[in-house]
Amino acid sequence: MNYKINAAWLCFLLLLLSGAPAVSQSQWTYDFNNGLTPIESGGTKLKVLGQPGKYVKEPIPGTEGLFRTTYRFETNSGLQFDNTEAKGFLSKSFTVELYFKMDSLSSWKRVLDFKNRKSDYGCYIYDGKLNFYDFAISEKAPVRRNQYLHYVYSRDFETKKIKMYINGIEKLEFKDPGTEGMLDQDQLLNLFQDDLVANHEASSGSVALIRVYDRVMTPVFIRRSYQSLMKTKPPVEPVAEKEKDPEPIQEPAKEEPKVNSNLVTVTGKVYNSQNLKPINDANVSVRKAKDETVVANTKTTDGTYQVQLPPYETYHISVEAIGFDSKSMSVKTGGKSQEVKSLFNLSAESYEQPVITMFFGQSSEVLPDDAKAKLDAMVDYFNKRPDLKIVLKGHTDNIGNFDKNVDLSRQRVESVKTYLAGKGIPSDRIDGAGYGSARPSYMNKSESQKQLNRRVEVWAEPIKR
């Protein structure tokens, strides 16, 4: 009987597969009728994270006597896709498609983790919105507690463009600032289990479908996939029931009065990640992403800030507070009279990562304009922190002679030091060294990776008394 009951759900999956264009790339589909094994032959079996879940037969809404198999996961538990076992299936461009629901949507709830629990970055649902912490957050999406949603994440390997969809509609698009949106050396994709940094931002729930593709799926394909999912419920649910975007379970924050109706209001909160208390008097600066020009500066009041920005632009928002590591986030403004929210949780100063990183042209020690803009923004921070000194670390790619690269990295350090001295930073507060190609951030396997290795990092270090 159960085999007949699950036939409708299997038909839906076959519908999607038959509707997809014939391409050489492949995909793995998990519908849990075969446990954690994909319906396609030869695929990688999913692994259990945390507490083992349960397979549950759930009635398909709008039907009589039809069921689908779901995987029920507990809080801070979930599933894992091993990309090594899959022979690098998700190593370049890829898409992840999910159909799931969560029991709780209070605060942050982890969806995808690309760094195997070592980083707080990744995909969440927060306040009814899609969030890639801490670089981008969407407008409100139709996300509600205990209600299934169609969730899609894609990343283009060449352009680094990340897109996120809910119920067939694109809700978020931004450029990955590095490799935060792809798997690290562990090559593990974790679903629904939170990292070890926060380790509590997760919910229990159920998942009915997981599908991974080794390519970026088009918006048309994603919309069609969602529509096919909805149409396989005999009889079809009324349009009003199926299509409307319900409000998230949380009460939306009250919108502040707008100073200019032609601008977009960007509001944000800055809080201490250790005790979740708001951080007052933090410096907030906003720059255009395309040229790093400063467009706004403000401070937090009771941990909250607000700025007015022109629409249809991408901006970098940076937050600095005494005693905390600084953080930055990319925000894309939409149409006029919208409100965009951003959230920063700052960690106590550790001096374990550079304050800023500047990149240089091939074989050049000339300081680019965007690097000067970053330094200009940083000068005020060090002027207010006489207890810190600046440590410059210069690097190159692996092209050319090793000794010459060491000399070039030292020249790059001197270029930065000279610029900072011209801005009033005493030279005795600036140390520096050049390491040539000995300490790459990336593997130097492509031109894009080599560009990221041609850099000078600015580190802060307490002055020993």
Image (cartoon, rainbow, N blue to C red):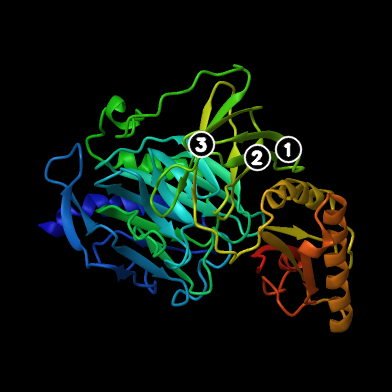
Query: Can you identify the residue that label 2 sits on?
Result: 285
At horizontal 26% and vertical 34% (from top left) the residue drawn is 236
Q: Nearer the viewer, residue 52 or 293?
A: 293
Q: Nearer the viewer, residue 76 or 423?
A: 423
On the picture, is 87 further left or further right than 32?
Answer: right
On the picture, is 129 further left or further right than 207?
Answer: right
Residue 294, which numbered label? Answer: 1
Question: How far is the residue under mark 3 from the one under mark 1?
Answer: 18 Å
At horizontal 54% and vertical 58% (from top left) the residue drawn is 181
Q: Quadrant of the C terminus?
A: bottom right
N-terminal of the two: label 2 or label 1? 2
The three-letter amino acid code for the residue at tag 2 is Ser
Neighbor class of circle 1 (other Cα within 10 Å; few <14, some 14-19, many 20+) is some
Neighbor class of circle 3 (other Cα within 10 Å; few <14, some 14-19, many 20+) is some
Count of numbered marks: 3
Q: Quadrant of the N terminus?
A: bottom left
Q: Nearer the viewer, residue 97 or 339?
A: 339
The three-letter amino acid code for the residue at tag 3 is Gly
At horizontal 38% and vertical 53% (from top left) the residue drawn is 110
SS at circle 3: strand
SS at circle 1: strand
Q: Is residue 379 above or below residue 185?
A: above
Whether residue 396 is visible here, answered yes or no, is no
Residues at discs 2 and 1 in contact (Cβ within 8 Å): yes
Question: How far is the residue under mark 2 from the one under mark 1?
Answer: 7 Å
The three-letter amino acid code for the residue at tag 1 is Val
On the picture, is 336 further left or further right than 246?
Answer: right
Q: Give the residue furthest to the front.
A: 465
At horizontal 51% and vertical 33% (from top left) the residue drawn is 301
Q: Is residue 239 above or below residue 458?
A: above
